[in-house]
Amino acid sequence: IGARLGRDRQPTRRGARRMMGSLPDGPLLDAVREAAARAHAAQNDVSRLQEVADGKLARLQAMHDAERALRRRAEAEVAVLGRCLRDAEAFHALREVQADVRAAKQAQQAQALRAVLEHQSRVAKEQRQEQAGAHARVAKLEFEREQLLLRLARLEEQRSALRSQQQQQQQLLQLQRE
């Protein structure tokens, strides 16, 4: 109807009724009314289809937005996991270095302890040798002391005997003088 009227757009319902009201009654008017009703139903169908399409498009757009948000979240989580992995690797490397340092310290302490024990063992051996030598010297000195005491006792006896002899000689000399 709009094409016959020279318009680019379809007539509104009111305009279609006005046009149909000016046509004479008859089969042509019925055909026009049916065509108008079909056009109106088709326009309603197109409107519903457009609404459905708009709804689907909105859902698709929402899904696309949600998918992009999920992708961004997944990328952020991957980045966080990457940092966690790097941190874990660094922590593991640090633990290995600390274990190596502990092992080196323990080895150094063990070596120092071994050196101290060896020194103490040498010192103890030397002390035992010195003690054994000292005991031997003490025993020798005690033996020499005993010998000196015996000699002293003999000398005392000899002295005593000499005194007594001297006294006897003096007594003899006195007696001879008298």
Image (cartoon, helix red, strand yellow):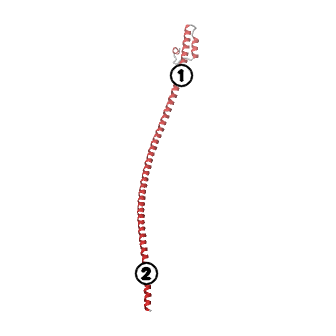
140 relative position to 13: left or right: left
Write down the residue under mark 2.
Answer: 161
Q: Secondary structure at mark 1?
A: helix
Question: At 44% from the left edge and 76% from the top edge, which residue is drawn?
Answer: 153
Q: Nearer the viewer, residue 155 or 129?
A: 155
Question: At 44% from the left edge and 83% from the top edge, which residue is drawn?
Answer: 164
Tell me the crowding category of disc 2: few under 14, some 14 to 19, or many 20 or more residues within 10 angstroms, Cα based.
few
Nearer to us: label 2 or label 1: 2
Q: Amino acid at mark 2?
A: Ala
Question: At 55% from the left edge and 7% from the top edge, which residue is drawn?
Answer: 27
Tell me the crowding category of disc 1: few under 14, some 14 to 19, or many 20 or more residues within 10 angstroms, Cα based.
few
Q: Position of residue 112 (x, y in %)?
A: 42, 55
Q: Nearer the viewer, residue 134 or 3?
A: 134
Work out whether 57 lies above or below 1. Answer: below
Q: Position of residue 30 (x, y in %)?
A: 56, 9
Residues marked 2 and 1 touching at CB (< 8 Å): no
Question: At 43% from the left edge and 56% from the top edge, which residue is drawn?
Answer: 117
The count of marks equals 2
Work out whether 80 lies above or below 65. Answer: below
Write down the residue under mark 1.
Answer: 52
Q: Secondary structure at mark 2?
A: helix
Q: Position of residue 6 (x, y in %)?
A: 51, 16
Image quadrant where one finds the C terminus: bottom left
Q: Amino acid at mark 1?
A: Val
Mark found first going from the N terminus, 2 or 1: 1
Q: Which mark is residue 65?
A: none
Work out whether 111 lies above or below 35. Answer: below
Q: Residue furthest bottom?
A: 178
Q: Nearer the viewer, residue 29 or 120?
A: 120
Spatial separation of the CA atoms under disc 2 and disc 1: 156 Å
